[in-house]
Image: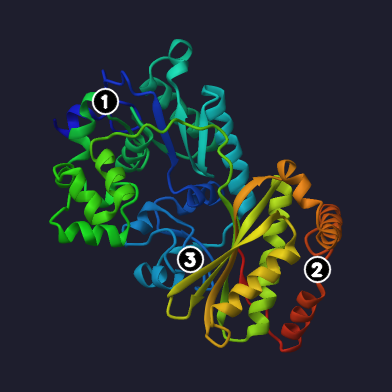
Amino acid sequence: MSRKQITGVGPVPASGADDEGCPILHVDMDAFFASVELLERPELRGRPVIVGSPSGRGVVLSATYEARAYGVHSAMPMSRARRLCPHATVIPPSHGKYGEVSRGVMEIFHAVTPLVEPIASDEAFLDVGGARRRLGPPAAVARMIKEQVRERYGITCSVGVAPSKFVAKLASRQCKPDGLLVVPAAGVVAFLHPLPVSALWGVGERTEQALTRLGIRTVGDLARVPVATLRRELGQAVGGHLAALAWGRDERPVTPHAPDKSIGNEETFAADVDDPETIRRELLRLSERVAARMRKSGYVGRTVSVKLRRADFSTITRSRTLREPTDVAQVIYATACSLFAAAGLERVRLRLVGVRMEQLSPAETAAHQLSLGERDSGWREAERAMDRAIQRFGPDAVVPASLVRGRLDEMGAGEADGEVRE
């Protein structure tokens, strides 16, 4: 079956697109951060634009398709992006604007169906099977969503319509930007099999290399390999998972309001750092941010993870699971410092550090454990008081003493605060 036969590509789906049995939509904003920035700078439309820190030490958060034509993509080091596209306009990120538009877009989704599963601020899965009688077939719903997003917010999105989440996400990727692609149930295999095997969820660089050694380059190649062979070569779980995806089998439902799997923050330094005290100050700053976000979101976590990226971009992560869940910055910070010391990088030049909390659970379900430690309870109350002060007086109202000393040291040396904010 040809691409023309199974698709409706463009802002309007092809007439008569067969969307029977295709209740799942994947809606993905096109170059979201960059598109939001262009709302206030329309003179930059049609030109290469990169959203990220102008200092060159950070990474690309978003790029217009004109910049992507030069090889620029999200998460690329800004220094490389500027080499690839030196004439691009670089805009520092403004996260407040993105959050406001994201909330509005999610409201559009929820007006269509209660079955909305956000994946990020700029994409979500929707199950519109129950909206057919009220709003029409899935392709018509997808077209309506695209029109409302454009009319209300002046940005575009791409929508994949398919029988499953996996195929819908691939479909939205295939029709970017500003497209709509329907993959009918009868056309799933014809759609999947010509794609490169890297298109499958779970195929990273190592898995792709392993598959290439077996002569497997497309999804169709993979589908023709016996499941037993894939399990032997890739492991029981991965082999079975990829074998199912190669035939379009994905039974996962759309899960509304899926909880965050982790909460974290990371910083890229303005210059590589090999001073342990500076690193520990940054770990404290990050631990404070992570703990505040957890308390605001109503979560506690059990696993502390640190991310350490060397000057050569090689990255290691270390994690430790606590005996009891916590949302206390001092506990997170002490664990992060211990992990940093155990990594053996205290005299190694680092480009980036990060702190993340995993194994999250709602704070109310962990209330008993949280009240057990008197010392931790004291820290928790103090940090909640800090939260209230910051909410009332601003982010600099309360700052740990060691961070104040760090700022004074930097000011005394005549230097700016050496970090790129997320």
- How many other residues sit within 10 Å of disc 1, few (<14), some (14-19) or many (≥20)? many
Mark 2 vs 1: CB contact within 8 A: no
**Amino acid type at image mark 3:** Val
- What label sits on residue 59 in the rendered view? 3
The one of 244 and 391 positioned closer to us in this rendering: 244
Q: To which quarter of the image does residue 280 belong?
A: bottom right
How far across and how far down the image is residue 10, in percent?
31, 33
The one of 74 and 315 positioned closer to us in this rendering: 315
The one of 233 and 121 positioned closer to us in this rendering: 233
Left or right of 147, for residue 386: right
Residue named by callout 2? 399
Label 3 sits on a secondary structure element that is loop
Point out the tag, 2 or 3, that comes first from the N-terminus: 3
Q: Answer yes or no: is residue 259 visible.
A: yes
Look at 50% across and 28% down and name the residue there. 148
How far across and how far down the image is residue 151, in percent?
51, 31
- What label sits on residue 66 in the rendered view? none
- Front of the two marks 2 and 3: 2
How far across and how far down the image is residue 337, in percent?
65, 74
How far across and how far down the image is residue 163, in percent?
33, 27
Q: Answer yes or no: is residue 219 visible.
A: no
In the image, residue 396 sits, relative to residue 189, either above or below, namely: below
